[in-house]
Image (tube, rainbow, N blue to C red):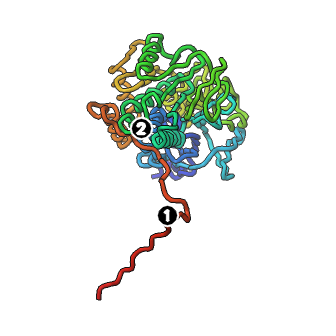
Protein backbone atom coordinates (compact mmCIF):
# COMPACT_ATOMS: atom_id res chain seq x y z
CA UNK A 1 0.00 0.00 0.00
CA UNK A 2 1.40 3.36 -1.08
CA UNK A 3 0.57 6.20 1.34
CA UNK A 4 2.22 8.82 -0.87
CA UNK A 5 5.21 9.37 1.39
CA UNK A 6 7.58 8.30 -1.37
CA UNK A 7 6.10 10.81 -3.78
CA UNK A 8 6.20 13.62 -1.20
CA UNK A 9 9.16 12.97 1.11
CA UNK A 10 9.60 15.07 4.24
CA UNK A 11 12.00 17.97 3.68
CA UNK A 12 15.52 17.43 4.85
CA UNK A 13 17.38 19.95 7.00
CA UNK A 14 18.95 21.60 3.96
CA UNK A 15 15.52 21.93 2.30
CA UNK A 16 13.83 23.64 5.23
CA UNK A 17 13.26 27.40 4.99
CA UNK A 18 16.30 29.26 6.27
CA UNK A 19 15.76 31.99 8.87
CA UNK A 20 18.70 34.26 9.68
CA UNK A 21 18.56 36.30 12.88
CA UNK A 22 21.19 39.04 13.23
CA UNK A 23 21.87 39.96 16.84
CA UNK A 24 21.78 37.95 20.05
CA UNK A 25 20.24 40.60 22.30
CA UNK A 26 16.76 40.65 23.82
CA UNK A 27 14.93 40.78 20.47
CA UNK A 28 17.19 38.29 18.69
CA UNK A 29 16.98 35.65 21.41
CA UNK A 30 13.21 36.09 21.67
CA UNK A 31 12.93 35.51 17.92
CA UNK A 32 15.11 32.39 18.01
CA UNK A 33 13.16 30.90 20.92
CA UNK A 34 9.85 31.63 19.19
CA UNK A 35 11.06 29.46 16.31
CA UNK A 36 11.86 26.46 18.52
CA UNK A 37 10.22 23.38 17.02
CA UNK A 38 9.27 25.21 13.83
CA UNK A 39 10.00 23.52 10.46
CA UNK A 40 12.85 25.93 9.71
CA UNK A 41 16.62 26.20 9.96
CA UNK A 42 17.72 29.10 12.16
CA UNK A 43 21.10 30.82 11.95
CA UNK A 44 21.90 33.32 14.70
CA UNK A 45 24.70 35.74 13.82
CA UNK A 46 26.37 37.90 16.46
CA UNK A 47 29.77 39.53 16.70
CA UNK A 48 30.02 38.39 20.31
CA UNK A 49 29.78 34.84 21.62
CA UNK A 50 27.49 35.85 24.47
CA UNK A 51 24.29 37.70 25.23
CA UNK A 52 24.64 40.62 27.65
CA UNK A 53 21.94 41.56 30.14
CA UNK A 54 22.50 45.29 29.74
CA UNK A 55 20.19 46.52 32.53
CA UNK A 56 22.73 45.23 35.07
CA UNK A 57 25.94 46.34 33.34
CA UNK A 58 26.27 49.25 35.74
CA UNK A 59 26.59 46.71 38.56
CA UNK A 60 29.62 45.25 36.77
CA UNK A 61 31.06 48.73 36.25
CA UNK A 62 30.77 49.56 39.95
CA UNK A 63 32.08 46.27 41.35
CA UNK A 64 28.75 44.75 42.37
CA UNK A 65 28.65 41.79 39.97
CA UNK A 66 31.05 39.68 37.97
CA UNK A 67 30.77 39.99 34.17
CA UNK A 68 29.82 36.31 33.90
CA UNK A 69 26.74 36.99 36.02
CA UNK A 70 25.16 39.11 33.30
CA UNK A 71 26.31 37.24 30.18
CA UNK A 72 25.01 34.04 28.59
CA UNK A 73 26.90 31.80 26.15
CA UNK A 74 24.93 31.92 22.90
CA UNK A 75 25.93 28.43 21.80
CA UNK A 76 24.22 27.11 24.92
CA UNK A 77 20.94 27.72 23.05
CA UNK A 78 21.54 24.42 21.23
CA UNK A 79 21.17 22.52 24.49
CA UNK A 80 17.43 23.02 24.23
CA UNK A 81 16.91 23.99 20.60
CA UNK A 82 18.47 21.83 17.91
CA UNK A 83 17.27 23.82 14.88
CA UNK A 84 19.55 26.78 15.64
CA UNK A 85 23.12 27.35 14.49
CA UNK A 86 25.26 30.12 16.01
CA UNK A 87 27.75 32.01 13.85
CA UNK A 88 30.30 34.29 15.49
CA UNK A 89 30.68 37.00 12.84
CA UNK A 90 29.70 40.54 11.88
CA UNK A 91 27.19 41.55 9.22
CA UNK A 92 28.65 44.08 6.77
CA UNK A 93 26.49 43.83 3.64
CA UNK A 94 22.87 43.09 2.77
CA UNK A 95 21.14 42.42 -0.57
CA UNK A 96 17.39 42.18 0.11
CA UNK A 97 16.52 41.61 -3.54
CA UNK A 98 18.55 38.41 -3.74
CA UNK A 99 18.07 37.54 -0.07
CA UNK A 100 21.79 37.38 0.56
CA UNK A 101 23.95 38.86 3.28
CA UNK A 102 27.72 39.19 3.51
CA UNK A 103 29.80 38.78 6.65
CA UNK A 104 33.07 40.40 7.62
CA UNK A 105 34.97 37.23 6.65
CA UNK A 106 33.49 37.59 3.11
CA UNK A 107 31.16 34.62 3.61
CA UNK A 108 27.81 34.97 1.89
CA UNK A 109 24.66 33.49 3.41
CA UNK A 110 21.37 33.05 1.61
CA UNK A 111 18.13 33.20 3.55
CA UNK A 112 14.40 32.87 3.10
CA UNK A 113 13.52 35.08 6.06
CA UNK A 114 15.66 37.67 7.79
CA UNK A 115 15.29 39.29 11.22
CA UNK A 116 17.51 42.29 11.96
CA UNK A 117 17.84 42.59 15.73
CA UNK A 118 21.39 43.89 15.96
CA UNK A 119 20.54 46.54 18.53
CA UNK A 120 22.10 49.94 18.96
CA UNK A 121 25.23 51.50 20.38
CA UNK A 122 26.24 54.58 22.34
CA UNK A 123 25.25 57.92 20.79
CA UNK A 124 27.72 60.71 21.49
CA UNK A 125 25.61 63.21 19.48
CA UNK A 126 28.76 64.52 17.78
CA UNK A 127 30.02 66.05 21.04
CA UNK A 128 33.70 66.98 20.61
CA UNK A 129 36.00 64.78 22.69
CA UNK A 130 33.22 62.50 23.94
CA UNK A 131 34.28 59.41 22.02
CA UNK A 132 37.93 59.92 22.97
CA UNK A 133 37.64 60.87 26.64
CA UNK A 134 34.29 59.59 27.94
CA UNK A 135 33.54 56.00 28.93
CA UNK A 136 30.51 54.41 27.34
CA UNK A 137 28.70 51.59 29.14
CA UNK A 138 26.89 49.56 26.53
CA UNK A 139 28.96 46.37 26.49
CA UNK A 140 30.67 44.07 28.96
CA UNK A 141 34.15 45.24 27.94
CA UNK A 142 33.15 48.88 28.42
CA UNK A 143 31.76 48.16 31.89
CA UNK A 144 34.98 46.39 32.86
CA UNK A 145 37.02 49.30 31.56
CA UNK A 146 35.09 51.67 33.83
CA UNK A 147 35.60 49.37 36.82
CA UNK A 148 39.33 49.01 36.14
CA UNK A 149 39.83 52.75 35.65
CA UNK A 150 37.89 53.47 38.84
CA UNK A 151 40.08 51.25 41.00
CA UNK A 152 43.34 52.38 39.36
CA UNK A 153 42.38 55.96 40.14
CA UNK A 154 41.44 55.07 43.73
CA UNK A 155 44.77 53.32 44.30
CA UNK A 156 46.64 56.33 42.90
CA UNK A 157 44.73 58.65 45.23
CA UNK A 158 45.44 56.42 48.23
CA UNK A 159 49.16 56.29 47.39
CA UNK A 160 49.52 60.09 47.21
CA UNK A 161 46.93 61.57 49.60
CA UNK A 162 49.01 64.69 50.25
CA UNK A 163 49.20 65.76 46.61
CA UNK A 164 46.18 64.07 45.05
CA UNK A 165 42.82 65.86 44.87
CA UNK A 166 40.84 62.64 45.02
CA UNK A 167 38.45 61.23 42.47
CA UNK A 168 35.81 63.19 40.57
CA UNK A 169 33.22 61.19 38.60
CA UNK A 170 30.83 62.87 36.15
CA UNK A 171 27.88 60.90 34.75
CA UNK A 172 26.52 62.46 31.56
CA UNK A 173 22.80 61.77 31.22
CA UNK A 174 19.97 61.73 33.72
CA UNK A 175 17.98 58.82 32.35
CA UNK A 176 17.59 55.46 34.06
CA UNK A 177 21.16 54.36 33.27
CA UNK A 178 22.67 57.60 34.53
CA UNK A 179 20.64 57.53 37.73
CA UNK A 180 21.49 53.89 38.40
CA UNK A 181 25.23 54.20 37.84
CA UNK A 182 25.44 57.40 39.90
CA UNK A 183 23.49 55.81 42.75
CA UNK A 184 25.68 52.70 42.69
CA UNK A 185 28.86 54.80 42.73
CA UNK A 186 27.58 56.85 45.66
CA UNK A 187 26.75 53.70 47.59
CA UNK A 188 30.12 52.17 46.74
CA UNK A 189 31.81 55.29 48.05
CA UNK A 190 29.99 55.54 51.36
CA UNK A 191 29.63 51.87 52.26
CA UNK A 192 32.35 49.96 50.45
CA UNK A 193 35.28 52.30 50.01
CA UNK A 194 35.29 54.45 53.14
CA UNK A 195 36.70 51.68 55.34
CA UNK A 196 38.91 50.26 52.56
CA UNK A 197 40.51 53.61 51.65
CA UNK A 198 41.00 55.58 54.88
CA UNK A 199 43.56 57.71 53.03
CA UNK A 200 40.81 59.20 50.85
CA UNK A 201 38.44 61.61 52.58
CA UNK A 202 34.77 61.24 51.71
CA UNK A 203 34.53 64.64 50.02
CA UNK A 204 37.51 63.75 47.83
CA UNK A 205 35.39 61.20 45.95
CA UNK A 206 32.51 63.05 44.31
CA UNK A 207 29.76 61.88 41.96
CA UNK A 208 27.88 64.35 39.77
CA UNK A 209 25.10 63.93 37.19
CA UNK A 210 25.04 66.36 34.27
CA UNK A 211 21.65 66.48 32.53
CA UNK A 212 20.64 68.78 29.68
CA UNK A 213 17.03 68.86 30.85
CA UNK A 214 15.80 70.19 34.14
CA UNK A 215 14.58 66.83 35.47
CA UNK A 216 15.88 63.29 35.82
CA UNK A 217 14.28 60.11 34.34
CA UNK A 218 11.81 62.08 32.21
CA UNK A 219 9.64 59.08 31.15
CA UNK A 220 8.58 58.56 34.78
CA UNK A 221 5.72 60.46 36.48
CA UNK A 222 6.61 63.71 38.25
CA UNK A 223 6.28 62.20 41.72
CA UNK A 224 8.81 59.48 40.93
CA UNK A 225 11.18 61.94 39.26
CA UNK A 226 11.15 64.14 42.35
CA UNK A 227 11.76 61.16 44.64
CA UNK A 228 14.74 59.99 42.57
CA UNK A 229 16.33 63.45 42.69
CA UNK A 230 15.86 63.75 46.46
CA UNK A 231 17.24 60.27 47.10
CA UNK A 232 20.32 60.85 44.96
CA UNK A 233 21.06 64.12 46.72
CA UNK A 234 20.57 62.45 50.10
CA UNK A 235 23.23 59.95 49.07
CA UNK A 236 25.66 62.69 48.16
CA UNK A 237 25.20 62.85 44.38
CA UNK A 238 25.45 66.38 42.97
CA UNK A 239 22.93 67.29 40.27
CA UNK A 240 23.83 69.78 37.55
CA UNK A 241 20.62 70.19 35.56
CA UNK A 242 19.62 72.46 32.71
CA UNK A 243 22.87 72.43 30.72
CA UNK A 244 24.29 69.86 28.33
CA UNK A 245 27.86 68.87 27.60
CA UNK A 246 29.48 70.98 24.90
CA UNK A 247 32.91 69.30 25.00
CA UNK A 248 34.61 66.46 26.86
CA UNK A 249 38.23 67.00 27.84
CA UNK A 250 40.73 64.61 29.47
CA UNK A 251 40.29 66.39 32.80
CA UNK A 252 36.66 67.46 32.71
CA UNK A 253 33.60 68.56 30.75
CA UNK A 254 32.65 71.95 29.33
CA UNK A 255 28.92 72.65 29.51
CA UNK A 256 26.66 74.59 27.18
CA UNK A 257 26.19 77.27 29.84
CA UNK A 258 29.95 77.92 29.88
CA UNK A 259 30.69 76.10 33.14
CA UNK A 260 33.60 73.69 33.48
CA UNK A 261 33.36 70.64 35.73
CA UNK A 262 36.49 68.75 36.58
CA UNK A 263 36.31 65.02 36.00
CA UNK A 264 38.76 62.17 36.44
CA UNK A 265 36.24 59.66 35.09
CA UNK A 266 33.47 60.73 32.71
CA UNK A 267 30.76 58.12 32.10
CA UNK A 268 28.52 58.69 29.07
CA UNK A 269 24.92 57.55 29.61
CA UNK A 270 23.16 60.06 27.39
CA UNK A 271 21.62 58.05 24.57
CA UNK A 272 21.84 55.35 21.90
CA UNK A 273 21.79 55.13 18.10
CA UNK A 274 21.91 52.36 15.45
CA UNK A 275 25.31 51.10 14.35
CA UNK A 276 26.83 53.04 11.44
CA UNK A 277 26.56 50.14 8.98
CA UNK A 278 22.74 50.15 9.17
CA UNK A 279 22.68 53.30 7.04
CA UNK A 280 24.55 51.43 4.25
CA UNK A 281 22.00 48.62 3.87
CA UNK A 282 19.56 50.61 1.69
CA UNK A 283 16.67 50.00 4.05
CA UNK A 284 13.87 52.48 4.83
CA UNK A 285 15.01 54.47 7.85
CA UNK A 286 13.03 56.63 10.21
CA UNK A 287 13.76 58.88 13.16
CA UNK A 288 17.24 58.43 14.58
CA UNK A 289 18.30 56.19 11.69
CA UNK A 290 16.20 53.25 12.90
CA UNK A 291 14.65 50.78 10.43
CA UNK A 292 10.98 51.45 9.63
CA UNK A 293 8.68 48.47 10.08
CA UNK A 294 4.95 47.84 9.92
CA UNK A 295 2.72 46.66 12.72
CA UNK A 296 3.73 43.04 12.00
CA UNK A 297 7.43 44.07 12.18
CA UNK A 298 8.12 43.45 8.48
CA UNK A 299 10.42 46.08 7.00
CA UNK A 300 8.43 48.54 4.91
CA UNK A 301 8.38 47.41 1.28
CA UNK A 302 10.38 44.23 1.96
CA UNK A 303 8.30 41.10 2.56
CA UNK A 304 10.04 38.32 4.53
CA UNK A 305 12.38 40.89 6.11
CA UNK A 306 11.78 41.79 9.75
CA UNK A 307 13.41 44.19 12.21
CA UNK A 308 12.88 43.98 15.96
CA UNK A 309 14.14 45.64 19.11
CA UNK A 310 15.99 48.93 19.42
CA UNK A 311 17.12 49.02 15.77
CA UNK A 312 13.50 49.17 14.56
CA UNK A 313 10.94 51.94 14.75
CA UNK A 314 7.33 50.82 14.47
CA UNK A 315 4.23 52.93 13.79
CA UNK A 316 3.50 52.75 17.52
CA UNK A 317 6.91 54.24 18.38
CA UNK A 318 7.76 51.84 21.18
CA UNK A 319 10.45 52.88 23.68
CA UNK A 320 13.95 51.38 23.38
CA UNK A 321 13.67 49.13 26.41
CA UNK A 322 14.00 45.43 27.16
CA UNK A 323 10.29 44.56 27.20
CA UNK A 324 9.45 46.08 23.78
CA UNK A 325 12.48 44.26 22.35
CA UNK A 326 11.44 40.90 23.84
CA UNK A 327 7.83 41.23 22.75
CA UNK A 328 8.74 42.36 19.23
CA UNK A 329 11.17 39.46 18.87
CA UNK A 330 8.46 36.99 19.85
CA UNK A 331 6.04 38.49 17.32
CA UNK A 332 8.68 38.39 14.55
CA UNK A 333 9.27 34.71 15.25
CA UNK A 334 5.56 33.89 15.33
CA UNK A 335 4.97 35.77 12.08
CA UNK A 336 7.72 33.82 10.33
CA UNK A 337 6.02 30.62 11.50
CA UNK A 338 2.78 31.96 10.02
CA UNK A 339 4.38 32.75 6.66
CA UNK A 340 6.00 29.32 6.48
CA UNK A 341 2.61 27.71 7.13
CA UNK A 342 0.78 29.97 4.67
CA UNK A 343 -1.09 31.96 7.32
CA UNK A 344 -1.35 35.76 7.57
CA UNK A 345 0.87 37.69 9.95
CA UNK A 346 -0.42 39.42 13.07
CA UNK A 347 0.34 42.83 14.52
CA UNK A 348 2.36 43.49 17.64
CA UNK A 349 0.13 44.34 20.57
CA UNK A 350 2.54 45.71 23.10
CA UNK A 351 1.78 45.01 26.76
CA UNK A 352 3.32 47.75 28.86
CA UNK A 353 4.67 46.03 31.96
CA UNK A 354 6.12 49.24 33.32
CA UNK A 355 9.57 50.74 33.86
CA UNK A 356 11.91 50.71 36.83
CA UNK A 357 15.09 52.38 37.99
CA UNK A 358 17.10 51.59 41.11
CA UNK A 359 18.97 54.25 43.07
CA UNK A 360 20.54 52.12 45.77
CA UNK A 361 19.73 49.88 48.68
CA UNK A 362 16.01 50.07 49.49
CA UNK A 363 15.57 52.94 47.05
CA UNK A 364 14.03 52.61 43.58
CA UNK A 365 11.16 53.87 41.45
CA UNK A 366 8.69 51.73 39.52
CA UNK A 367 5.86 52.73 37.22
CA UNK A 368 3.81 49.59 36.61
CA UNK A 369 1.75 50.02 33.45
CA UNK A 370 0.96 53.62 34.42
CA UNK A 371 -1.36 52.37 37.17
CA UNK A 372 0.83 51.41 40.11
CA UNK A 373 3.65 53.70 41.21
CA UNK A 374 6.14 52.47 43.77
CA UNK A 375 9.10 53.97 45.61
CA UNK A 376 11.50 53.04 48.41
CA UNK A 377 11.89 49.43 49.52
CA UNK A 378 8.78 48.14 47.78
CA UNK A 379 10.02 49.35 44.41
CA UNK A 380 13.48 47.98 45.18
CA UNK A 381 12.13 44.50 45.89
CA UNK A 382 10.04 44.63 42.70
CA UNK A 383 13.12 45.70 40.74
CA UNK A 384 15.17 42.86 42.25
CA UNK A 385 12.55 40.22 41.40
CA UNK A 386 12.01 41.41 37.82
CA UNK A 387 15.71 41.62 37.00
CA UNK A 388 16.59 38.26 38.52
CA UNK A 389 13.76 36.49 36.70
CA UNK A 390 14.64 38.23 33.40
CA UNK A 391 18.16 36.76 33.34
CA UNK A 392 18.82 33.81 31.06
CA UNK A 393 19.76 30.54 32.72
CA UNK A 394 19.51 29.31 36.33
CA UNK A 395 23.21 29.82 37.00
CA UNK A 396 23.04 33.50 36.11
CA UNK A 397 19.96 33.99 38.26
CA UNK A 398 21.59 32.29 41.25
CA UNK A 399 24.96 34.08 41.06
CA UNK A 400 23.35 37.47 40.40
CA UNK A 401 20.97 37.04 43.33
CA UNK A 402 23.93 36.14 45.57
CA UNK A 403 25.90 39.15 44.34
CA UNK A 404 23.07 41.62 44.88
CA UNK A 405 22.17 40.20 48.28
CA UNK A 406 25.77 40.50 49.51
CA UNK A 407 25.87 44.07 48.21
CA UNK A 408 22.51 45.29 49.45
CA UNK A 409 21.10 42.73 51.90
CA UNK A 410 21.14 42.88 55.69
CA UNK A 411 23.64 42.73 57.33
CA UNK A 412 26.06 42.43 54.39
CA UNK A 413 25.46 46.00 53.18
CA UNK A 414 27.30 47.37 56.21
CA UNK A 415 30.58 45.85 55.07
CA UNK A 416 30.28 45.19 51.34
CA UNK A 417 33.41 44.02 49.55
CA UNK A 418 33.39 45.25 45.93
CA UNK A 419 34.65 43.11 43.08
CA UNK A 420 37.94 44.87 42.47
CA UNK A 421 39.06 46.06 39.07
CA UNK A 422 42.22 44.93 37.33
CA UNK A 423 44.78 47.26 38.90
CA UNK A 424 48.24 46.80 37.32
CA UNK A 425 50.65 44.61 39.28
CA UNK A 426 53.55 46.38 40.97
CA UNK A 427 56.82 44.83 39.80
CA UNK A 428 60.39 46.08 39.25
CA UNK A 429 61.22 47.32 35.75
CA UNK A 430 63.24 45.03 33.51
CA UNK A 431 66.91 45.09 34.43
CA UNK A 432 66.31 46.74 37.82
CA UNK A 433 68.73 45.94 40.67
CA UNK A 434 68.75 47.22 44.28
CA UNK A 435 70.82 50.35 44.96
CA UNK A 436 73.35 48.34 46.97
CA UNK A 437 73.87 45.94 44.07
CA UNK A 438 72.64 42.45 43.31
CA UNK A 439 72.30 39.96 46.10
CA UNK A 440 73.60 36.57 44.89
CA UNK A 441 71.98 33.47 46.31
CA UNK A 442 74.15 31.56 48.86
CA UNK A 443 75.80 28.39 47.66
CA UNK A 444 74.12 25.21 48.82
CA UNK A 445 76.21 22.10 49.34
CA UNK A 446 74.20 18.93 48.92
CA UNK A 447 74.40 16.38 51.68
CA UNK A 448 76.36 13.21 50.99
Residue 198, label in figure? none
Q: Nearer the viewer, mark 1 or mark 2?
A: 1
Q: How many marks?
A: 2
Choose between 250 and 141: the one closer to the eye: 250
- Using the rendered image of the protein, determine whether residue 36 is visible from the camera's viewpoint: no
Choose between 155 and 349: the one closer to the eye: 155
Choose between 337 and 250: the one closer to the eye: 250
Where residue 225 sits: x, y (%)?
47, 14
Where residue 133 sits: x, y (%)?
62, 36
Look at the numbered disc 1 and give the secondary structure of its residue.
loop
Where residue 34 sits: x, y (%)?
48, 36
- Using the rendered image of the protein, determine whether residue 9 is visible from the camera's viewpoint: yes
Look at the numbered disc 2 and give the secondary structure of its residue.
loop
Residue at the extreme top of the image, as rendered: 222
Q: Which residue is mark 2?
A: 199
Taking the spot 34% from the left edge, 23% from the top edge, the residue there is 362
Choose between 337 and 328: the one closer to the eye: 328
Residue 212: image quadrant is top right
Question: Relative to residue 313, is residue 377 drawn left or right?
Answer: left
Q: Label 1, label 2: how many angstroms apart (C-alpha)?
A: 29 Å
Where residue 180 sits: x, y (%)?
46, 27
Q: Which residue is mark 1?
A: 434
Badge 2: residue crowd in 10 Å (few <14, some 14–19, many ≥20): some
Which sits earlier in the primary sequence, circle 1 or circle 2? 2
Taking the spot 63% from the left edge, 21% from the top edge, the residue there is 259
Taking the spot 55% from the left edge, 65% from the top edge, the residue there is 431
Badge 1: residue crowd in 10 Å (few <14, some 14–19, many ≥20): few
Taking the spot 52% from the left edge, 41% from the top edge, the residue there is 149
Residue at the extreme front of the image, as rendered: 436
Amino acid sequence: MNDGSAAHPAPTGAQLPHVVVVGGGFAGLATVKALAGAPVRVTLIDRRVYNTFQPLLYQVATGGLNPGDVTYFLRALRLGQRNVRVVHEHLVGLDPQHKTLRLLNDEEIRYDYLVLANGVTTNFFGTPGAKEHAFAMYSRSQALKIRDTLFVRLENSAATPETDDGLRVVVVGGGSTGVEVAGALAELRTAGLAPAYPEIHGDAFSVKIVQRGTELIKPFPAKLRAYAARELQRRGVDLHLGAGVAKVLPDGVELTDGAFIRSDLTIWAAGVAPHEEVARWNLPLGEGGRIRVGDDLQVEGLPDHFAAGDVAISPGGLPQLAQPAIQSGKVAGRNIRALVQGRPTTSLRYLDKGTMAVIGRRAAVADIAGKLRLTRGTAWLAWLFVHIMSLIGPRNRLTTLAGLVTRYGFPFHRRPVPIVGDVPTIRPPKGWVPEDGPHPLPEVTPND
